[in-house]
Amino acid sequence: MNQTANPEVMLFASTTQSFLEKEASLSRVRELHEAGTSFEHDWWRRAAELGWTSLLVPEELGGGSVSGDGVSDLALVAELAGKVVAPGPLHPVSTVLAGLVEAPEGQRDTIEAVIVGETVASWAVYEPGRPWAPLQPKVTAVPTGSGFRIDGVKDRVEAGADAGLLLVTARCDGAVRQFLVPTDAPGVTVERQSSIDLVKSYARVRFDGVELDAGAVVGSAEQTPAIIARQSQIAAILQCAEIVGILNTVLDFTIQWGFDRYSFGRPIGSYQALKHKYADLKIWLEACRATTKAAVGAVASRSDKADLLVSVAKSYVGEYAPGVVQSCIQLHGGIGVTWEHDLHLYLRRTTLYRSLFGTPEEHQLRVYALDKELNRSLEHAS
Amino acid sequence: MTETASAPVHNTTESVEEFAARAKAWLAENMPRIDPDNPPDTDRGAEEPWRRARELQRRLWDGGFAGICFPREYGGLGLPYEYQKAFNEVSRGYELPMILNTPTFTICAATILDTASEEQKRKHIPAALRGDEVLVQLLSEPSGGSDLAGVITRADRRGDKWVINGAKTWSTSAFAADYGLMLARTNWDVPKHEGLTMFLVPLNSPGITMRRIKQVNGSVEFCEEFFDNLELGDDAVVGEVDKGWEVASRQLYHERRAVGGGSEYASGIGAEGKTDRPIDYVALLEKTGQADNPWAQQLAGRALAHRMVREQLIDHVYHGVLDGSLHPASGSIIRIAHAETHQLEFDTALAITGASGVVDGDDDLIRHGERYLSRQTASLGGGTTEIARNVISERILGFPREHAADKGIPFKDVKRGRS
């Protein structure tokens, strides 16, 4: 995410930033919320034209990145989106594309439609009442003569009510598989779920005997766990990167507030009790940035440690980020808890991400298990 | 021993990978491997580890791997940090003179490099790199630690000599050292920062009485020194007379980076000895019968995540300061992260061991309870975390400085106690 040296990346970043500031400002987010809209499809098509959707896709499939490292470029987009808590399906679309490019056979047209922003796709992985367990779906896929039949319920599908296509995890012949399901297919019912975010909406999706042809399956049974792992990594680093953008912005204007706001005849930033709080916030921001950068790098290079470093970042950022924003609210005083102030927009998004795709506690358990595994294999190797 | 000023010749165009490969081969031939089940117990408070460290340092020197980031004219290899990091990676599992890293190399030699005379640099840096000189800091005093510029050890001019009287404390391993960087007051008629001078003191000089300080955990590595008419020449002055604060500031800068673990002058990574080894949580959970307890696994996972984030933060801050995206004072960020991570790890071990950590069940788990008792040392040593938070908020974020009642006042008129 610190690719400021590359002029093409700088240009991409500044184009993305001015688009976000103009077309996805905080006041725009408030307007969308008032109107009960999550995002506008036309806006998303223009975002796609800027290249956001092509970053994870290799050139031979119609994609391409600015720096040659699409994962890092995408993390940069997420970080910039965090600065304005932008609306839009960047996360679900990217997560689905991350999966499709691992097994693109027969999906070229779909990938193309998603890249140009014509089709909004989302990952249907959560199931009602169940925690984050992407490899243990209860939704079933039964082979039929000509394809598969899907039954079951998914929920917390991001932008599900605005999506045309879902990538659905399901159990099939004892293995986990993923299927592309159009939301207008017979037997699919989509019900909007609101979230604590102002514009990010989710959906509960029922599959009642949905018939798919054989081309709907993505990847082989052997490939699928690794593809799901990759999608999970992309989902998590996008959250972390967006949160880094949020924390950076919130801390910047909260520091400014420390200079501008006076009480007892002096700026509140001159009181040691608050100065030390500010120092902690700065440390946590840099720590979140450092661990996110490490996770993004590991995912970009497909390191053996990618799963571990993603869980380290996701657990750390999830543990600290909401508290950092809450402290910024505290530093603002009463204005911080008003609807009028923008702080709650940032707190909403941060809290949402804290808890989706694995809570800090769930990722701490993963860190323990992965570290144990890694040390065992190291011992074995030596 | 030969007194050559430069290390054996090496190839300047060698890539990091080639360097690492050569170091790997050399280490295998020349350095002792650590037995993971029985690592050397490097107690900084004992004499033997220091003799051993000097011997190992000499081996590194003879092999051409001492002072990787120190300039060539002072006996180092003059290579970028990447080479040191590569060496650190390949040297894992070997016995290295880790206790010489801090303060000798990372703080004292680094400060000498920045501020001392050409003659002092040529004398002391190669000597340290050969393992002939151990260097320490003589900064804190019994009357105060955080307010370093308020030192009251005095250096008075008598003829062509400086005569030192006063006391220093919390000097790490001074009993095993050859020289100490000592801050003393040479002018009492000017405000506190303006009347200080740094001296490089031979510790075997007459006029120095040394005493060990015993800590809560029984360690006796820290010392207290009393100076009674210690005489020094002008050649002992580091930097300029009355400009000692500039030298001390460089020391503090290097200290914050070193304490956080972000100095390119440190060679080798890993534990100094048994008590410094990172907690093996998998083993701890097994030993306490909680291998399958999700609560204990989660606590351990959290501590491991924090440990890794600390490493990532060190890297991030190092490169951020280098490329200008972070303020030069950001070493204080890793200084605090170091303390907080230690605290979390000690707290986690105490939680996981429970009753076994406080009553000796002949299973060696009580050491986690013992370790907890010394938890705050990581937040105190090397400058308190309170001072580090002042540094971050004032220098990095730009908030107003704390009110100082001694500002602009001749030091002799500054109140130093209630009376």
Image: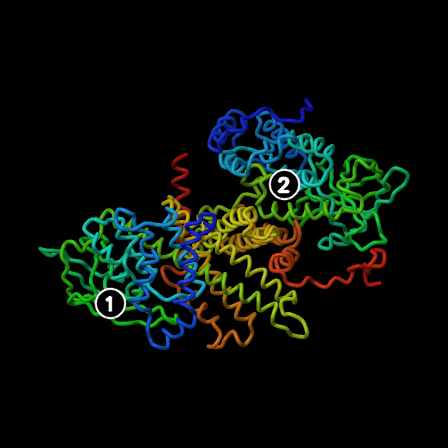
Q: Residues within 10 Å of mark 2 (few under 14, many from 20)?
A: many
Judging by the rendered image, the residue that carries numbered circle 1 is: A205
Q: Is residue A164 above or below residue B341?
A: below
Q: Quarter holding the C terminus of chain B?
A: bottom right
Which percent across, then down, holds residue A155?
A: 28, 66
Q: Amino acid at mark 2?
A: Thr
B202 left or right, relative to B56: right
- Chain letter of disc 2 in the image: B
B189 or B166, nearer to the observer = B189
Gap in angstroms between the C-alphas marked 2 and 1: 60 Å
B133 left or right, relative to B10: right
Q: Is residue B244 above or below residue A267?
A: above
Which percent across, then down, holds residue B52?
A: 63, 31
Q: Quarter holding the N terminus of chain B?
A: top right
User: Which colour scheme appears in the figure?
Assistant: rainbow
Which percent across, then down, holds residue B315?
A: 52, 46
- Which quarter of the figure has residue A304? top left
B204 or B79, nearer to the observer = B79
Q: Is residue B47 above or below residue A100?
A: above
B149 or A366, nearer to the observer = B149
Q: Amino acid at mark 1?
A: Val
- Chain letter of disc 1 in the image: A
Judging by the rendered image, the residue that carries numbered circle 2 is: B106
Secondary-structure class at tag 1: strand
Q: Residues within 10 Å of mark 1 (few under 14, many from 20)?
A: many
Q: Residue furthest left?
A: A145
Mark yes or no: residue A13 visible: yes
Residue at the image position 65 percent from the left and 53 percent from the top: B380
Q: Is residue B26 above or below residue B186?
A: above
